[in-house]
Image (cartoon, rainbow, N blue to C red):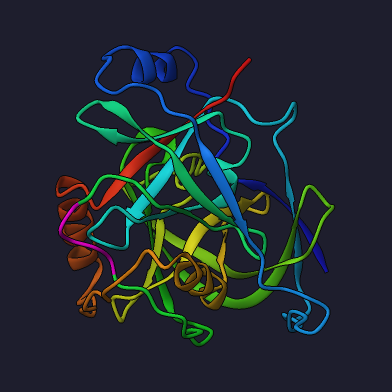
Amino acid sequence: MARQGCGCLPFILGALVLAVWFGGGRSPLVPLEVEQFDPRSPRRPLPQWGNESFVIEDRPGGPADSMGTAFAVDGDGAWLTAEHVTHGCARVGLEDDGYARPVSRVLESRESDAALIRDGIAIRARLPLSAAMPPSGSRGYHMGFPAGEPTLVTSELIGAADARRGGGGRTQPVLAWAERARIPDGDGPLSGISGGPTFTESGHVVGINSASTDRRGRILTTDPEAMTRLVVASGAVDERAVAYPFADMADAMRRFAGWVDDGMIRRVFCDVDD
């Protein structure tokens, strides 16, 4: 049963992006090196992912200056985000004190909507990852910057599914979640949350925010095993962070606010040459 959807990323910044990139002159622009990682082959096909599938519509006209979310997974500058956040960009930058600090090395997954920034901002703290598939009905906590504002979305896991971006290309494994609540309250598009972490109650990140469907209340995230395969292949993550279970919604919100303040979850910007 196919479902139409749209990527969370498409949020054109226009003059704001130009101001972020060129307003401060804090860092010289550097060439962006993009590598690709694809573990799939005829000898290792992807498993079947249930009977529900999604088509994620690409942005009309192709990539544009835009904004998403990224989160730290290693203290030496490794960050995860969504592959469609970085794909087609001439420059990618992490928010740093009101400006976009350019990065030069990105590893994009061809298996799922995941990308790893190799030379991002180095910070001591990092978020814990898990490759374990959460059981259906698990509560999810999605964190990021819809419309540029920090927002926490809670959901309930429906189960595994598959998705095709733009109706073409290879099928990607995803997890489908039913939205339950937002802080702050709202029902607008989730543009800008793409690339942000999705937690379960255990305190582990089990996916990367990828898309929301046009059928109100569905959120798609990357498959946890595909996410961690990219991290392992990168060789950029040396130590695993410790996970602490969330006590409740208020605890999740407090932690999210702290992670934003500490710079562990940041906005990431894409600059596309004209």
Image-based side of 170 in relation to 172, left or right: right
Q: Residue at x 31, y 12 (%)?
A: 23
In the image, residue 207 sits, relative to residue 100, either above or below, namely below
Q: Position of residue 46 (x, y in %)?
A: 74, 79
Q: Quadrant location of residue 36?
A: bottom right
Q: Residue at x 42, y 28 (%)?
A: 30
Instruction: State which quarter of the image contains the N terminus.
Output: bottom right
Question: Does the magenta run of residues contain 116?
Answer: no
In the image, residue 122 sits, relative to residue 38, either above or below, namely above
Nearer to us in this view, 50 or 116:
116
What secondary structure is the magenta-colored segment mainly? loop
Nearer to us in this view, 195 or 36:
36
Image-based side of 72 in relation to 210, left or right: left
Image-based side of 160 in relation to 104, left or right: right
Residue 246 in sight in this render: yes
Q: Residue at x 25, y 57 (%)?
A: 76
Q: Quadrant location of residue 245?
A: bottom left
The magenta span reads 123-127
Q: Position of residue 198 (x, y in %)?
A: 41, 65
Image-based side of 173 in relation to 245, left or right: right
Residue 8 in sight in this render: no
Instruction: State which quarter of the image contains the C terminus.
Output: top right
Q: Position of residue 68 (x, y in %)?
A: 45, 41
In the image, residue 70 sits, relative to residue 254, either above or below, namely above
Q: Position of residue 246 (x, y in %)?
A: 23, 75
Q: Residue at x 24, y 63 (%)?
A: 126
